[in-house]
Amino acid sequence: MSINFNIIKALIRTEKASIYEPKGKYLFLVHNSANKIQIKQAVEYRYKVKVRDVNTFVSGGKLKRVRHQLGKTPDTKKAIVTLKEGQKITEATP
């Protein structure tokens, strides 16, 4: 089993993400090409927890204007990871 350590970019700790925590769910910023199985394996290995479910979504980048040219911020992929009963992620980075 090969686990890519670049799949998880960050554990998102915002006010909106903290709404999920009492339900055993955590929000992660992940690599755009990562699939749910890879995300599950990476979270289980990195944080030593058992994952029950993974939901992913892609937030599209925004159009920005720099001087007289149009540009676009990159798309980002996020994952809502649901842990099994009694599991918890305590630290921001292991």
Image (cartoon, rainbow, N blue to C red):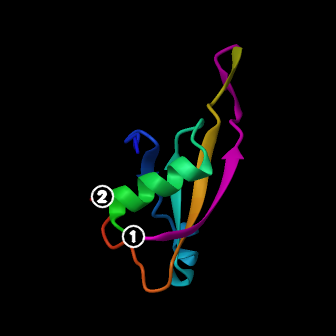
Name the image quarter holding residue 62: top right
Name the residue rendered at 45%, 63% in the picture: 13
- The part of the image, by quadrant, that contains residue 89 is bottom left
Check if mark 1's residue and mark 2's residue have beta carbons within 8 Å.
no
On the image, numbered disc 2 is attached to which residue? 93
Residue tagged 1 = 49
Q: Amino acid at mark 2?
A: Thr
Q: Is residue 58 above or below residue 41?
A: above
Which residue is at a point 69% across and 51% down the rendered structure image? Answer: 57
Q: Nearer the viewer, residue 80 or 4?
A: 4
Magenta stretch holds residue 60: yes
Which class describes the residues within 10 Å of circle 1: few (<14), some (14-19), or many (20+)? some
- The local crowd at label 2, few if under 14, some if 14 to 19, many if 20 or more residues have their Cα within 10 Å, is few
The local secondary structure at tag 1 comes to loop
Callout 2 secondary element: loop
Give the residue furthest to the front.
1
Whole-percent x, y for residue 64 in the image? 68, 28
Across and down, in percent, residue 10 comes to: 43, 51
What predominant SS class does the magenta segment belong to?
Answer: strand
Among numbered discs 1 and 2, the one appearing first in the sequence: 1
Question: Quick one: 18 or 31, which is closer to the camera?
Answer: 31
Placement of 29 over or under 92, stated as above or below: above
View extreme (top): residue: 68
Q: Seen in the image, is 69 located left or right of residue 11?
A: right
Q: Residue at x 56, y 82 (%)?
A: 23
Vertical side of 88 occupied by 71: above or below = above
Q: Is residue 49 left or right of residue 76?
A: left
Return the x and y of residue 79 as percentages of the image width and height: 59, 56
Q: Is residue 6 magenta?
A: no
Q: Which residues are magenta?
A: 50-68
**Amino acid type, label 1:** Val
